[in-house]
Image (cartoon, rainbow, N blue to C red):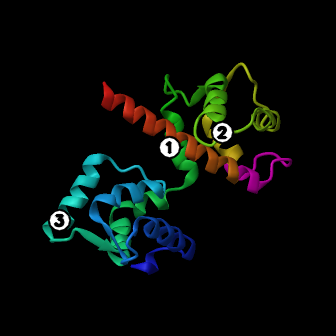
Amino acid sequence: MAENFSKAQLDEFREAFSLFDVKSSGAVPVSELGTIVRSLGHNPSKSDMQLIEGELKKEGKTEVDFGDFLGIVSKNFKEADQEDPATELRDAFKVFDKRGDGMISVTELVHILSTLGEQLTEDEVERLFAEGNLEPNGEINYDAFVKLITTGGTSDLHLEQGRRRAGLLEEQIATVRHEMSELSRAQ
């Protein structure tokens, strides 16, 4: 199962797994799987985790070892890891595209960038707008914006910075999705 993941992914999985292996037994309780998976950046629904936990309990398992854990991640969460970050960002921005025309308000974008998830500083937001030739009072085409942040955009905006911003946005968007999910459950 380990061959399905990069060394970096395996290291990340081992670290998360070991945090929940409080007895240092090489196994974690089935009931902790959802928490571990969420700590790795996935957002499975409660019902998805109940199905996974139910299957394991039917097999008589109350704990899973690291190999079992890798199998669960590979079977249930691997496809999400393989999706193109730009596609994920575009899909997430669609949530804010109220008219369905590929545009979102710059005001809303500034709010997202500066208040949700790992926030960008005011200076970082202003620099992004300046380098992307974005107007602070209008709307932006989010496809163009995603391209700007994931490819490095202009000559002054380096690829590494664009990827960092894409990572930050993914975290912010995941936070927004989680908050929206919690709000819909509360209603």
Q: CA distance from mark 2 to mark 3?
A: 40 Å
For residue 143, above or below residue 32: above
Asked whether 152 falls inside the magenta stretch, the response is: yes
Where in the figure is residue 131, as x and y percent of width and height? 82, 38
Magenta region: which residues?
150-162
- Horizontal arrangement in the rendering, residue 135 relative to residue 175 (left or right): right
For residue 5, above or below residue 44: below
Rendered-image quadrant of the C terminus:
top left
Task: Pick whichever, 124 or 81, lies toward us.
Answer: 124
Which disc number belongs to residue 57? 3
- Three-letter residue code for mark 2: Gln
The answer to which quarter of the image holds residue 147 is: top right
Task: Read off the residue under disc 2.
Answer: 119
Q: Who comes first in sequence, dot 1 or dot 3?
A: 3
Residue mark closest to the camera, 1 vs 2: 2
Residue at 81% in and 45% down: 154
